[in-house]
Image: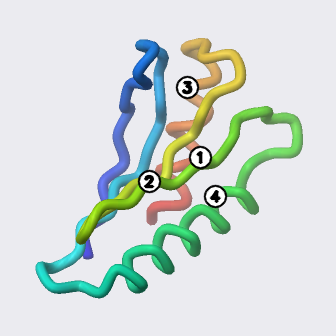
Amino acid sequence: MTKTVSQGESRYGTPEPQIALRFPKGTSYRVVKAALHKLATEIELATPAGERWCVNTEDESESGRVYLELADATPAEAARGMAMLEKVAI
């Protein structure tokens, strides 16, 4: 599995910090879903109490992502989200 942290963009053009996961061809859908849920849990637990973003998952056949839906979508909030995701991704 490969894990990539990046600053995505929502369909509305706002920043969307994310961690993308890619699995080898033939990986079970359940393995992908379980890994996304596990990562989302780690992100929720690492999120400071004062942050108001939502942690979401999106899955495809052998890949998926966990992303932050930012409350205010300011550059500062996006930077805090990216910093937190980079710590979790280690």
Label 1 to label 4: alpha-carbon separation: 8 Å
Determine contact: label 1, label 4, CB under 8 Å.
yes
The residue mark sitting in front, 1 or 2, is: 2
Query: Which of the two labelled residues, at mark 1 and mark 2, occupies the earlier sequence position?
Result: 2
Query: Which of the two labelled residues, at mark 2 and mark 3, occupies the earlier sequence position?
Result: 2
Q: Position of residue 67 (x, y in %)?
A: 50, 45
Determine contact: label 4, label 3, CB under 8 Å.
no
Tell me the element at label 1.
Answer: helix
Tell me the element at label 3.
Answer: helix
Where 25 sits versus 56, above or below? below
Label 2 to label 3: alpha-carbon separation: 19 Å
Q: Which mark is residue 43?
A: 4
Query: Mark 1: which amino acid?
Result: Met
Structural crowding at the residue carrying mark 3, measured as other residues with C-alpha within 10 Å and reported as few (<14), some (14–19) or many (≥20): many
Tell me the element at label 4.
Answer: helix
- Of residues 1 and 58, the one drawn nearer to the viewer in this rendering: 58
Q: Position of residue 81 (x, y in %)?
A: 58, 36
Reading the image, the residue beneath label 1 is 84
Reading the image, the residue beneath label 2 is 58
Query: Which of the two labelled residues, at mark 1 and mark 4, occupies the earlier sequence position?
Result: 4
- Which quarter of the figure has residue 74? top right
Where 67 sits versus 63, above or below? above
Residue lying at 47% horizontally and 30% vertically, measured from the top left: 16
